[in-house]
Image (cartoon, coloured by chain):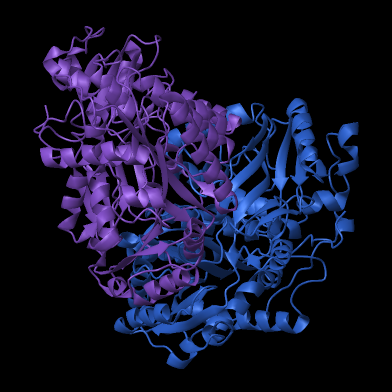
Chain colours: A blue, B purple
Amino acid sequence: MAARRVKLCGWGYEGDGLTPDEEKLVLGRYAERFGLDGFERIAQPQVEAIELHKSRIEPPQKLASICTTETYDRLVHTYGKSFPDYVRIYDSDFTNAPDIVAYARSETDVVDVLEWATGANVAVIPFGGGSSVVGGVEPAVGGGYAGTLSLDLTGLDQIVEVDKTSRAARMQGGIRCPALEAGLKSHGLTMRHFPQSFDMATLGGMIATRSGGHFATLYTHIDDFVESTRTVTPAGIMESRRLPGSGAGPSPDRMMIGAEGALGVITEAWVRLQDRPTFRASTAVAFASFENGVEAVRQLTQSGLHPANVRLLDPGEAVLNGAGDGNDTIVVLAFESADHPVDAWMERGLQICRELGGKFDADAAKNPEGHTEGAAGAWRNAFIKMPHFRDALISVAVISDTFETAVTWDRFHHFHDNVKAATEKAIEEVTGQKGVVTCRFTHAYPDGAAPYFTFQAVGRHGALLDQWNFIKQKASDAVIDYGGTITHHHAVGRDHMPWYRRQRPQLFGAALEGAKEKLDPAGIMNPGVIVG
Amino acid sequence: MAARRVKLCGWGYEGDGLTPDEEKLVLGRYAERFGLDGFERIAQPQVEAIELHKSRIEPPQKLASICTTETYDRLVHTYGKSFPDYVRIYDSDFTNAPDIVAYARSETDVVDVLEWATGANVAVIPFGGGSSVVGGVEPAVGGGYAGTLSLDLTGLDQIVEVDKTSRAARMQGGIRCPALEAGLKSHGLTMRHFPQSFDMATLGGMIATRSGGHFATLYTHIDDFVESTRTVTPAGIMESRRLPGSGAGPSPDRMMIGAEGALGVITEAWVRLQDRPTFRASTAVAFASFENGVEAVRQLTQSGLHPANVRLLDPGEAVLNGAGDGNDTIVVLAFESADHPVDAWMERGLQICRELGGKFDADAAKNPEGHTEGAAGAWRNAFIKMPHFRDALISVAVISDTFETAVTWDRFHHFHDNVKAATEKAIEEVTGQKGVVTCRFTHAYPDGAAPYFTFQAVGRHGALLDQWNFIKQKASDAVIDYGGTITHHHAVGRDHMPWYRRQRPQLFGAALEGAKEKLDPAGIMNPGVIVG
């Protein structure tokens, strides 16, 4: 039903991806990293070759025009974009394919779907960009339902209203980031929220999963940009008042932000916007010591300078991103403004770095185009291409995944060392050889950092799922044991539920259950996620 | 039981207040404002003269040592500090006095009180600073309970742990602001949260009511400083993990922040702190046009300069605070930092003001002690003394009260003009003469402002409560009708519930009920507030 078909296996749309030369380069680099001559490569499955179980349910006449049971539609709504998702796609394992895919074209469609599903005991899985890496959109709901329906929201793709005075816009939940930014550009505005899933992610999906965006400090999550929400629940529509701030009871929006579709479908939101920045300064600072790099980020976040970017790359991560020689810890520091030159900000920021032994190119720091050059530029390019890299790696059985968290400064080093060691140990134990575990900061706070770990290992076709599960479990256990959160911005989904249950106050779980009983009395909304 | 007894009638502790000379000055100024020769003054009631109904319930043996039914204790736990509270105190109306006052000395005491009250069907009213101006602590719970217990938490007054690295502290919920700041000072830290109720307010009370603090932009509510919370509910203890940021499900803290004691008692919190500022710049900018003053605040909040203060006073408000001649709109602009000189920030801020016709003393703006001088200094002094002013005014039947809200920039002027007109009309209708309605901004956001209205009128002893009610209702109706929130930082309490119900999404009300059924199944926690 879409103009451009999304890929069954891999990132983005059919036809997108790495060129054969880029792919060769990537695979060559990884073979070298792991000391191998080359890789055994397996082929992607073809839609036509996949046998899918028959749909167990039929949509009612009223919904027939927006529903389909076609194989392609069901296949591309079975999984998100996680490593284990990809492995199972290669295995042609579509056990949990939805019985029906409904393409909502209006809020009324959403209301109608939820009403029918409530009566028919059909589990509804809201599906936005489909870029979940935590099992958030997989219809794995157990045996308690008559069937499953994946509710595709990308038809709700309009910018409804723009308020330039307050710098805010009312937009539909299914609009993808590229369309959203293109639409706002004509008003001189931008949301400036650039998750790595930018190409695919939808506004409603990002709000439901507490997406992490462009700004490394201050406005880290999309939470801060949400002015009001409109959510369709099985019990009716819940819309909050548009307000710049309020102290009237607990925030209604904050209950929907992070509910991951378990309480309803976010069909619209008013979102706070930015003017397009015209003043920029960005540079990469190299620290011989990891500790000093971390200390620089701590001092920068506590300085009140509010840098737009203050990403730290440990030496291994810097190498992965072509931004270092493998010895130095790199801190990418950037300021931007639509209002004023940022020289005074950058000058003080670099002074903090210099006092901690940081080295940088003083000329590049003053260059307003610095953000597209040098280490900072290399980082940006790699960041945008990254989802495609993984497509190539999976076909050759390289286990390549990430996990991310947040922890207060006082326990950071203890946490970092133990989580890294637990992950390295798990890799060696389950694959028989050493892997690579690196760390960067995606976001940072006055009271702590959001470390983002990448792990890579040579796996084995046929055993990949078990190997990944083993590593993921050991890493997640360590994250919780040493005081982190199971996710800073990748969300909980189905994959993180065991650790989310350990992290979440038990009584808060009960409170969420109480809320769900009122909003979704039949329990049809994304079962198994967040609540329960 | 307290070392210094709090006043029965008025602000603060016995012995505190205006000097006779100050009082004379204030009353003289008000007589002049309303064109009167003087006022009829009534006397304050004396504790000894008040006849209080007998307690309907008795505490169990286990709690006897922390409970009292003494008249003084019950009287000072009947009301907060609102205008209608004061009127009823002058009338010696203590109909809703709690049957028991319990002074918790430990978290275990809180657990024990909630356990007993759940079994005995006793309504529990958490009582922190007792500075509610919205009926949040009055045991007006209807006839469905065996009795009422006011749970005084000021015995939980410890700073438990300080983490200098992450700039955070774990503190008990009953600690008052002055003790909290004094304790943090020895660590070189500060919470820098200065509500007008600073002298009395407690940490837990401020979190439960979403207190508005020192910073006019960015970190406006205490919400932003809460790192984690520990809450005793009738169902058990709920403690969130200490994290600088998280994307794991809806925030558990955000459900407790603003619950105003209806879900439990906040006994501890980890709070993010500030370094003590050493660089400051502050000045007052005068605008001949109110519209340009407002526009300056809009541009300043959208600039990314993040001023610590950007308070706007309309001409009438400026006069009330001794900071203007009655013609100009004043914007108090201030920057502060513990890390860097703020010259570049102030320079750009003043440039914005200048381009909109703002006039200021360029020398004072450069003076690091500027915050204690001129209009800015006058404002600070008046702010701190203000609660005492009202004590004097009530005794002479001057109706003097405030209400505050927030609204997006696009509708601000329409909102402001209509709310002001509705309040002025109500005053004239119910008192027979014109009153004074002024407006300032306490906080401001990129997408809107938090206007704070003051209204003053000559009332009549014996009719004050009805007169105030009439004005309050008309003003609150206008706030809701024209798109505001019923409160930006004064909380909901019992007084704002009718408008909170209109503002709150109906289904969010249901969700809160669902949560309460799990945390407080007997419904004993602060009944009538927030939930229901």
Which sits in the foreground, B351 or B490? Answer: B351
The correct choice, above or below, for A320 with respect to A159 in the image is below
Q: At 54% from the left edge and 35% from the top edge, which residue is drawn?
A: B478
Q: Please state if B183 lies on the left or on the right of A40 as rendered.
A: left
Q: How many labels does the image show?
A: 0
Q: Quadrant of residue A447?
A: bottom left
Which sits in the foreground, A89 or A372? Answer: A372
The correct choice, above or below, for A277 with respect to A150 in the image is below
Looking at the picture, how far across and down is residue B508, in whole percent? 56, 32
Looking at the picture, how far across and down is residue B376, in whole percent? 29, 59
Quarter of the picture holding the N terminus of chain B:
top left
Q: At 66% from the left edge and 50% from the top edge, which residue is drawn?
A: A204
Residue A241 visible to the viewer: yes
Looking at the picture, how far across and down is residue A227, in whole percent? 57, 49
Q: Please state if B185 lies on the left or on the right of A410 as rendered.
A: left
Q: Please state if A231 lies on the left or on the right of A404 as rendered.
A: right
Looking at the picture, how far across and down is residue B330, in whole percent? 39, 58
The correct choice, above or below, for A121 with respect to A289 in the image is above
